Image (cartoon, helix red, strand yellow):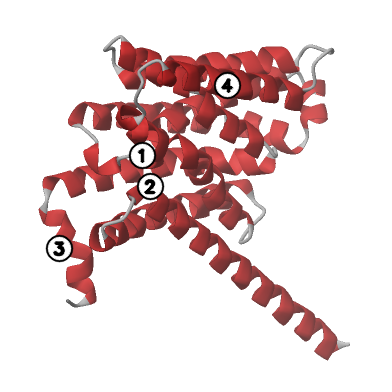
Amino acid sequence: MNILDWFLAPFQYNFMRTAALAGVLVSLTCASLGAYVVLRRMAFIGDALAHTVLPGLVIAYLNRWNMTIGAVLAGIATALGIGWLSRRREVREDTAIGILFTGMFALGILLMSSVRSFRDFTHMLFGYIVGVTDAQLRLFALIALVVLVVLMLLHKELELTSFDPTHAEVIGLRPDRLRDVLLVLMALAVVGAIQAVGVVLTSALLIVPAAAAAMLTRRLAPMMVFASVIAVLATLVGLLASYHLDVSSGATIVLTCIVCFLAAWGLRTLREQLSRTRRASRA
């Protein structure tokens, strides 16, 4: 099999085309938000949101509701809860995250244990991107549209509050409110990513492509572009590799993201070494 057949052969199947489109939508959403996550050092929040949607998923499953809607509601509730608690002087932000993270995740595990079997929840924990339905795909497209439009409309405000929240507050912006908006958008992105890579690995899809992009540039707009390209490529290559190797698609996608991060890190190290060498030769 030549390299072209390796890439194209799986897409003769409709479920692979659907999975690829879902992966692109989820990757664009997570990578765009991931740039802010990395700049604001909110990686722990991304991991917390990925775990705290679990009760919403389980409650929806037990009541035969739409599981994605259950995850959206749980994620938004957690995001607003983190924002509200972190504004209280008695509770620091990392403490608020820890309280909601552990509490919601424990609630999800408790509800799962009531079913007496974890088999039905394996897709929630580890993802099942090749099982995406047309209805879920439309929801992913809606989430991507909402997230990208809000980021575009609030780009200047979010950029300023990310780099200099004190100056933003002086000129009349509300950093806390903008942070709440960002948290809600992260909750929406997490819902889509869970279907692709599961609860356990969602935070990686939100953080790793943006961290790789941060190795290549410090400017926000190019960072978002690089992160999106890395996330989409890693998702497609990981999906194809999982198809040919017959292994977990979610884990393969995340490991491909890690490889991209290591490549970006190596490129930055090489660039810095060449820069030092040129400076030394001039001296």
In space, the residues marked 3 and 4 are separated at their CA atoms by 41 Å
How far from the left and from the top, in percent, is residue 174? Answer: 71, 18
Identify whether 270 is placed above or below 132.
Answer: below
Query: In the depicted view, which residue is nearer to us: 153 or 13?
Result: 13
Q: Disc 1 on helix, strand or loop? A: loop
Residue 76 seen: yes
Disc 2 designates what residue? 250
In space, the residues marked 4 and 2 are separated at their CA atoms by 28 Å
User: Which one is earlier in the sequence, the residue at label 1 or at label 2?
Assistant: 1
User: Which one is earlier in the sequence, the residue at label 1 or at label 3?
Assistant: 3
Q: Residues within 10 Å of mark 1 (few under 14, many from 20)?
A: many
Q: Disc 4 on helix, strand or loop? A: helix
How far from the left and from the top, in percent, is residue 223? Answer: 57, 51
The label number, if any, that marks residue 127 in the structure image: 1
Q: Is residue 15 left or right of residue 56?
A: left
- Please report contact status of discs 1 and 2: CB closer than 8 Å, yes or no: yes
Q: Quadrant of residue 115?
A: top left
Q: Residues within 10 Å of mark 2 (few under 14, many from 20)?
A: many
Disc 3 designates what residue? 9
| Residue in the picture at 49% in, 17% down | 110
User: Which one is earlier in the sequence, the residue at label 4 or at label 1?
Assistant: 1
Query: In the depicted view, which residue is nearer to us: 52 or 210?
Result: 52
Query: In the depicted view, which residue is nearer to us: 147 or 136?
Result: 136
Identify whether 67 is placed above or below 257.
Answer: above
Q: In the image, what residue type sits under mark 2?
A: Gly
| Residue in the picture at 61% in, 24% down | 101
Q: Nearer the viewer, mark 1 or mark 3?
A: 1
Disc 4 designates what residue? 181
